[in-house]
Amino acid sequence: MNMAVDPRRASGVTPAALELTDITRSFDEGNRKLHILKGANLRIEAGEMVALVAPSGTGKSTLLHIAGLLERPDGGNVFLGPVNCSDLSDDKRTAIRRNDIGFVYQFHHLLPEFTALENVMMPQMIRGLSKKLAAERANELLKYMKLEERVTHRPSELSGGEQQRVAIARAVANAPRILLLDEPTGNLDPKTAHYVFDALSALVRASGLSTLFATHNLELAGRMDRSITLQDGLVTPL
Ligand SMILES: Nc1ncnc2c1ncn2[C@@H]1O[C@H](COP(=O)(O)OP(=O)(O)OP(=O)(O)O)[C@@H](O)[C@H]1O
């Protein structure tokens, strides 16, 4: 695969797992413009776990959506490894999003009529994996998330923390390059939040996955490799 490899990155500096350069994004609010991102830069290395901690409304979700190729920025570039995703067609971006990016949201978005196991199998089968192999990997991931006793439960039969652990297993099912989490523990009590984080970080550390984790929880942020914030539309260290 050699889609839109930027020549500056094909030679020289080792590409980051994810790099955002000069990202701008504004929204129309009535007849004025809200400038949310004003040239934000961010580099996440392979295997790095980065916390994004910033006040409500400063643009965390906007940044995550741009990094996850769910939205295009007004300006700037998004690189995944050496590939500049900004130049790609919507179809190619969708393929990268499906194969290389995992997303976990505050609310789990699991399919209610399917079991935990089936929810984790689904993205693998959409990608073309056989049912047998998808089930093997789903079982392995759910075991890793300490949910081996819950594989046949539907989301409504699981606690909030269990639902989020299934959502994490589903997000990593296709072995993405990067995992983006938008306040995945925001809806959980502190003890459960730490339990979910323990399971996540064991998985992340074992697989060398790179993660960007938006949270308001400073204790969780302190357990990651570094923390960043958004200030006046720019990414700065916290
Ligand atoms: N599609 C949109 N149209 C108009 N305004 C938007 C849109 N998306 C986001 N905004 C505005 O941009 C700002 C940043 O939103 P964003 O959701 O990125 O913030 P956030 O930091 O994730 O907030 P929170 O922590 O509350 O989730 C907010 O003022 C929001 O109202």
Image: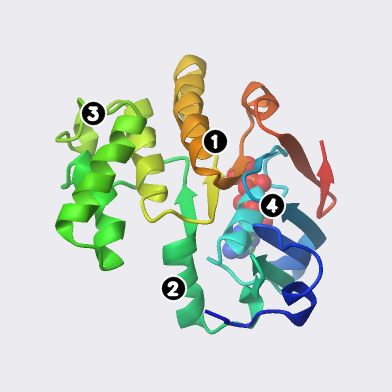
Residue at 53 percent across and 84 percent down: it is 89
Res 151 visible: yes
Residue that numbered label 3 is attached to: 148
Amino acid type of the residue tagged 1 in the rendering:
Arg
Residue that numbered label 2 is attached to: 95
Amino acid type of the residue tagged 3 in the rendering:
Glu
Q: Which of marks 1 and 3 is in front?
A: 1
Task: Point out the image quarter for the C terminus.
Answer: top right
Q: Does the residue labelled 4 lie within 8 Å of ligand 1?
A: yes
Q: How far apart are marks 4 and 2 (CA)?
A: 25 Å
Q: Which of marks 2 and 1 is in front?
A: 1
| Secondary element at tag 4 | loop
| Front one among 143 and 87 | 143
> Where is residue 157 drawn, in percent x and y?
19, 30
Which quadrant of the view contains residue 153?
top left
Amino acid type of the residue tagged 2 in the rendering:
Ala
Residue at 72 percent across and 79 percent down: it is 6
The correct choice, above or below, for 230 with respect to 124 in the image is above
Amino acid type of the residue tagged 4 in the rendering:
Gly
- Between discs 1 and 3, the one toward the N terminus: 3
